[in-house]
Amino acid sequence: MTGLRFDGQVVIVTGAGAGLGRAYAHLFASRGAKVVVNDLGGSRHGDGSSSKAADTVVEEIKRNGGNAVPDYNSVVEGEKIVKTALDNFGRIDILINNAGILRDKSFARISDQDWDLIQNVHLKGSFKTSQAAFPIMKKQKFGRIVMTSSNSGLYGNFGQANYSAAKMALVGLAKTIAIEGASSNVYCNVIVPTAASRLTQDILPPEIYDELKPELIAPVVGYLSHESCSENGSIIEAAAGWAGKCSIVRSNGSVLRSNIKDNVTLENVKENWGKIVDMSDAKTFQSIQDVTGALVGSLEGQAGTTGDSGVDSGSENEDIFNFSDRDTILYALGVGASLKNPKELKFLYENHEDFQTLPTFYILPSLQANFNSDFTAAVPGKDVNLSQVLHGEQYLEVFGDLQSEGQLISKVTIAEVLDKGSGAVVVTNVDSLNQKGDLVARNQIVIFAVGAGNFGGPRTGTKTIPCQNKPDRSPDASVVQKTSIDQAALYRLSGDRNPLHIDPGMAAVSGFDRPILHGLCSLGFSVRAVLETFADYDASLFKACKVRFTKPVIPGQSLRVDMWKVNNRIHFETIVVETNTAVITGAYVDLKSVKLSQVPPNMSDSNLKSDAIFEFIIEQVNADPSKAKSIGGVFLYNITKDGKQVKQWTMDLKNAKVFQGTPEGKPSTTLTISDEDFLLLAEGKLQPQQAFMKGKLKITGNLMLAQKLAPLLKTNAKL
Ligand code: NAI
């Protein structure tokens, strides 16, 4: 049999002695799985037990050439069923929680026993069996769990209150397991079947009963369980050779008061009832965070920030930004581009054959649009004064070729408003489109409004693009640039004419000794330094950047940009040299690729002996990648000289890649050794154990793995 298979995998199907479960067990076995056929063998109402049901299905599977074992435990002792899988097959990959019974009574007549039995078999049984299998699946980084719900649960059904309650509870259980298992490739979904079985023989209309074969549902459950299926946390209905996804939907609803300071009255609710229950533009939500986000949106509406203010309200929030090469050149001068450096001529001269716009110029339209959007009205119940707002963070991503003239139309939306107590954080997203309607730049602006906190909003959000910590090592490169005393006077001509940056009186009112430089100007200096060092001034290699502004800069101070390369991401931090104060932190530039005109000083010591050895290792690994992969692990080498770290190399043997710099994730083992000792090791003149004992070789992380490296290094004895 070709196609989707389960060879080597172990599947538990509960209640597999009849009906749907039997069909599932047959399908999995026919596709190569080893199956635990669980069934208590009781009656339709949950009375009695017998091994016959499970045994019969196991015999059928074996007769067809499959592999299966019976299990007669009740699902309420789910751990025993998982033990059967482990004892017989040594693992568990897929669990289908299917066992079920009925105790139908009209709601008024349900006894405690009818209630408890149904909850136990359906809900507790699925809980117990899944909880026993879940840690094993997480550990092996693969698992698929299917819960069985019912249309009775989703919609209710006369005479099935106990059953409906248990079946809907399984949806909640599945959705949370889906969230908790996702990072370990353990997915959990819900099947809502309709099939002919002993449970439905007197419920389903006879004319369609014969068409509802369980075998028509089994492939849907099979696919949901397959490693190639990435569905997670979904409710899938299947019947009669059809399948579809069900979802919980919510109406657009209605704000119940005109101002956040007002109370809500019963009459308000009555007046708005039509809108509250109007499902014509209902939405589905993917997560609890999305629902909370929508609530915050509704709060903003109540504060009167949307609609009238022009934020988030269709065409009114669109802002037009016209620019020409005069603007891009003025901006480049404003952020320190200079003819002192011949390579920067291309940012300053429109007839240059490679005339380019600095990518950070594309922050300007977002700032103008944000300023015009009246974002200060976004904090519910607070009047935000422009003189009290600080630019906290900035994100920029650019798309396509960067033009040096044209018109951009920017749309502002408020992503989230956070309550930090001492102030409010207003996060706005600004998309800038060219006249053809293509997205050219996406900005996110984080503004801190001092004193506008305590309005009852959430403290943390989900929409703010996070800053990133710099690597824990000395920088790979640093560039120092002196700003001019007139830097802010020049930069403000690019648009931000806030007097704080030029008027001494205004600076004093805001608590500064002198006018301060625009944070975005320091950002422009910093990104230029990154482009110089890691992109050979090629602006087209820029993809995105994110920064956090932590302290002001005074025009005339010198900025040192410390940079760390981690693949195509350049982390950086900007420091005022005179005061040794970090002014931009948590920052990075993402490049499409790195282009080095010269290897940065701290990455460049060309006289290192270890370089030749690593080059040799690269050749070896390339020649026989499978040998490297058989060792596995990710090794980070810190090479030192005269007691200082001078270079880093990564040997990612998992992927058979050896390169200069640090690995993307955490290395399995970090080795620190001097350049000279590394040569001695490679030549076989120094034994690794000896080097370790004498403190010449420091190893952190997985020590055992490091010992496996010996063969790879020994071959280098030839060197
Ligand atoms: P079925 O009665 O043919 O099969 C259920 C099996 O579960 C039986 O073999 C039974 O012995 C076993 N079982 C009952 N209690 C058990 C326990 N405590 N431990 C181990 N095994 C136990 O029923 P059917 O229709 O195949 O139902 C399978 C699942 O699908 C059930 O969860 C049911 O609620 C659900 N379902 C079925 C629908 C249908 O149209 N057939 C509709 C909606 C949901």
Image (tube, rainbow, N blue to C red):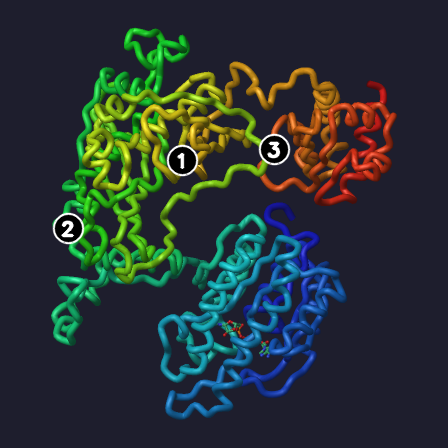
Question: Residue at label 3?
Answer: 662
Residue 311 rendering spot, x and y as whole percentages: 19, 46
Query: If the picture is divided into quarters, which one holds ligand 1?
Result: bottom right
In the displayed structure image, the side of residue 454 where residue 374 appears, left or right? left
* Depth order, front residue of 193/126: 126
N-terminal label among 2 and 1: 2
Q: Can I make out residue 295 in this image? A: no
Name the amino acid type tagged 1.
Val
Residue 428 rendering spot, x and y as whole percentages: 28, 44
Q: CA distance from mark 3 to mark 1?
A: 25 Å
In the displayed structure image, the side of residue 168 where residue 490 appears, left or right? left
Q: Is mark 2 within 8 Å of ligand 1?
A: no
Q: Is residue 414 above or below residue 293?
A: above
Name the amino acid type tagged 3.
Thr
* Depth order, front residue of 387/667: 387
* The C terminus lies in quadrant: top right
The image's mark for residue 583 is: 1
In the displayed structure image, the side of residue 273 where residue 289 appears, left or right? right
The image's mark for residue 307 is: 2
In what element is the residue under mark 3? loop
At x 72%, y 39%, the residue is 632
Q: Is residue 578 above or below residue 155?
A: above
Residue 548 rendering spot, x and y as whole percentages: 39, 39
